[in-house]
Amino acid sequence: MKNKVMYSLFGIFFTFIVLGLYAINGIGVPLESNSLNQGIDIEGYEVVISTTGDFEGRETPSHEGIYEIVGKPHNTLYNDGMDMTYNCLSSGSCDAITNITLCNTTCATPVAAGTEDYIEHDTCGLTSAIGTVYEQAGNGNWTVENTFTSTCDDVVTNVTRLQNTSTKFAGVAFTSVTLQTDDQLNINWSIKVS
């Protein structure tokens, strides 16, 4: 009889432990929600710089006129660019962000505050240009691209900016490129919204 009581108490105790574990585990289960917890992320996920000109690391001689990729550096979104995005989304007041500029000679690496030294090219075929916009099938991704053709010899550049007519959006530094007359530099900003 003593064994029956022990087995019964053990069975009851085991049942409470199992039920207790299910109760404790159930407390941590989140309830389904109808709200969306996804934010908006805007980023320049790739800037492709390619040229027929000369740069350190070039594998094909520049005199052959073949495009070679200088790099795909990470860009810096300027504080002004963040403000521009806010104004565009909140009030609809924004200009197209399609201007591509090039730095004259050697410029400092872009910083979010936009306070780096930057002198924009204003001659030699490298002046600010409105890039061609390519949208990618309604998925929130697009590119802004322009090909610059140098009209002078020994022209150096190492930074590009994407902006509207008056406000800088983003900037990126790349390996310094030296262009001769008729050398080309292609800047392709790819933008992703997710």
Image (cartoon, rainbow, N blue to C red):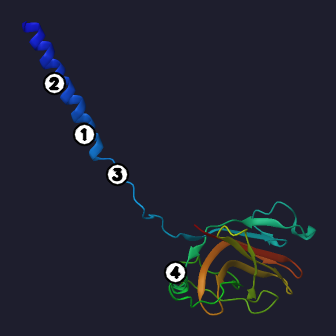
- In the rendered structure, are the residues bearing label 4 and label 3 in contact, judged by CB atoms less than 8 Å apart? no
- In the rendered structure, are the residues bearing label 1 and label 4 in contact, judged by CB atoms less than 8 Å apart? no
The residue beneath circle 1 is 23
Which of the two residues, 133 or 28, is positioned nearer the viewer here?
28
Q: CA distance from mark 1 to mark 2?
A: 15 Å
Residue 77, position as x, y percentages in the image = 56, 76
Position above or below: 50 against 81: above
At label 4, the amino acid type is Met
In this rendering, position of residue 185 left or right of residue 4: right
In this rendering, position of residue 19 left or right of residue 117: left
Position above or below: 97 against 42: below
- Residue in view at x 89 percent, y 67 percent: 66
The mark that comes first in sequence, 4 or 3, is: 3
Q: Is residue 102 visible?
A: no
Q: Residues within 10 Å of mark 4 (few under 14, many from 20)?
A: some
Where disc 2 sits, the SS reads helix
Q: Quadrant of the N terminus?
A: top left
At label 3, the amino acid type is Pro
The residue beneath circle 2 is 13
The residue beneath circle 4 is 82
Where disc 1 sits, the SS reads helix
Where disc 3 sits, the SS reads loop
At label 1, the amino acid type is Ala
The residue beneath circle 3 is 30
- Residue in view at x 30 percent, y 47 percent: 28
Position above or below: 4 against 85: above
Quadrant in which residue 159 is drawn: bottom right
The mark that comes first in sequence, 3 or 1, is: 1
